[in-house]
Image: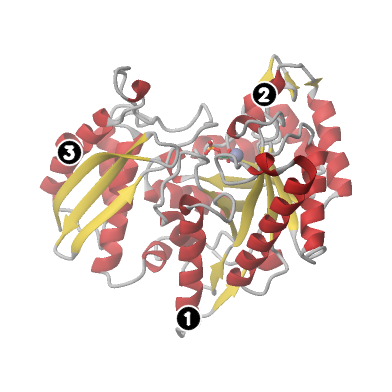
Amino acid sequence: MIEDIQAAQRLDSRGNPTVQVDVKTAHGTFRALVPSGASTGSHEAVELRDTCKAAYGGKGVLTAVGNVRTVIGPALMEKEFDPRTQQKEIDQFMCDLDGTPDKSRLGANAILGVSMACARAGAVAADVPLYEFLRQEAVKTGPYVLPVPFFNVLNGGRRSGNTMAFQEIMVAPTGAETFEEGVRWGSEIYSALKEIITKKFGPPATGVGDEGGFAPPITHLEEALDLLTEAVEARGYTGRVVFGIDPASSEFFKDGAYDIGFKDKKPDIKTPQDMMQLYRDVMEKYPIALLEDPFAEDDWASWSEFNQACEVELVGDDLLCANVHRVWKAKERRACNSMSLKMNQIGTVSEAIKAAKLAKSFKWGVFVSHRSGEETTDDFIADLTVALSTGHLKSGAPCRGEHVAKYNRLMDIEAELEGSWKPSEYAGARFRNPSTY
Ligand code: PGA
Ligand code: ZN
């Protein structure tokens, strides 16, 4: 039973306020810190921000914090839910209490914080690790799957000071034997990249973007992919890693076209057909295995056309916002073959699990993701990834606390599973569809 629910305003990795929730039970106090996005999809659940400009430029979350303390907390405690067995009921109750389709009354940030903290309380009450607790709701058979980490090592878009429109260039150690080995490869490639950038552009160019990736003064996608190729070669991993790209293209879509010159205000307008060609060209030249949001969130026709003949994983992030209505629409229109999973786009743990199960039922990939720069050191998504056997996740570069918290937690989980009777495996090349549901 829940004895107390408290909330507070704390800071995220960008120094902006975010919601912290503490749920107290007989087993202890369980905390969750909510992340938030920078290049958010317009169909996401609503994150409540205070309108008062005097504090934090209007970004305060005291209203959401107040909603936890005075509305959600008392109402949940009155119901005497048991977090050990009633995660779904708790989440549903909060959705009903909010009463809006996008959680705009109480705030998805308020609701998600409570949902995550309750899950942690439930896991301890059930005396199992969090990934095991969440897994009971999702996958019940097959080995435990450790994901392939997609390290975002080169940053562009709104996350960086350079002029590259494309937001994230990722490298993924699919050829490693274990998650831990994959982390080592990622870290080695990251350090090679630093050396190469220092040599080419000088030490000041090694500053990093919000996700910890380097943001050297480059403009074109191929420049980034060439740098990454060189770094992979330098550490001897050619042929054993794949690349992923998240252009976050909704950010530069306007009037039916894409302006990839938007960063330095020198318009470089591409039609959807030009973009498709651009992707095909780089896919031919580099080992690209994943494209996330290559088209804008409401450019459905381009998604559908490109997906027809697409061999790589096509992840809908802003396109879907992990919202089941949009997931169904994408299925009907055959718009993508994978779903990005960010818990705060939906707003509760149960709904995130439900969305992942739906995507899996279509034989889609599920790509668990942190939230760009407005992240916290909360490592919940590491357990979620294993629980859902998603086979891959992204949590930024292999550096800085808010990113490595997730990678470190996954190494802990891998070690724990290795030392147990439970069968486990690293997803490796099967990251798109690693396991049974
Ligand atoms: P966001 O970006 O968290 O700022 O939305 C990450 C992404 O686009 O995947
Ligand atoms: Zn994205």
Question: From what the image shows, is residue 367 above or below residue 19?
Answer: below
Instruction: Give residue 331's quadrant in the image.
Output: top right
Does residue 421 appear in the picture of this structure?
Answer: yes
Specify few, some or many for label 2: CA neighbours under 10 Å numbering under 14, 14-19, or 20 or more: many
In the rendered image, residue 227, in percent from the top left (x then y), is placed at 79, 47
Left or right? Give the position of 208 relative to 203. left
Question: Dot 3 corresponds to which residue?
Answer: 69
| Dot placed on the residue nearer the N-terminal end, 1 or 3 | 3
Specify few, some or many for label 3: CA neighbours under 10 Å numbering under 14, 14-19, or 20 or more: some
Q: CA distance from mark 3 to mark 2?
A: 39 Å
Q: Amino acid at mark 3?
A: Arg
Q: Ligand 1: does it lie within 8 Å of the C-beta at label 3?
A: no
- Going 79% across and 19% down the picture, which residue do you hit? 269
Instruction: Give residue 143's quadrant in the image.
Output: bottom right
In the rendered image, residue 139, in percent from the top left (x then y), is placed at 48, 65
Q: Amino acid at mark 2?
A: Phe
| Dot placed on the residue nearer the N-terminal end, 1 or 2 | 2
Give the label on residue 422, or none: 1
> Does dot 3 land on a helix, a strand or a loop?
helix
Does residue 91 appear in the picture of this structure?
Answer: no
Q: Quadrant of ligand 2?
A: top right
- Going 60% across and 67% down the picture, which residue do you hit? 435
- Do tag 1 and tag 3 residues touch (Cβ < 8 Å)? no
Toward the viewer: 288 or 198?
Answer: 198
> Does dot 1 land on a helix, a strand or a loop?
loop
Q: Amino acid at mark 1?
A: Lys
Toward the viewer: 72 or 113?
Answer: 113
- Going 23% across and 50% down the picture, which residue do you hit? 22
Q: Ligand 1: does it lie within 8 Å of the C-beta at label 1?
A: no
| Dot placed on the residue nearer the N-terminal end, 3 or 2 | 3
Which quadrant is the N terminus positioned in?
Answer: bottom left
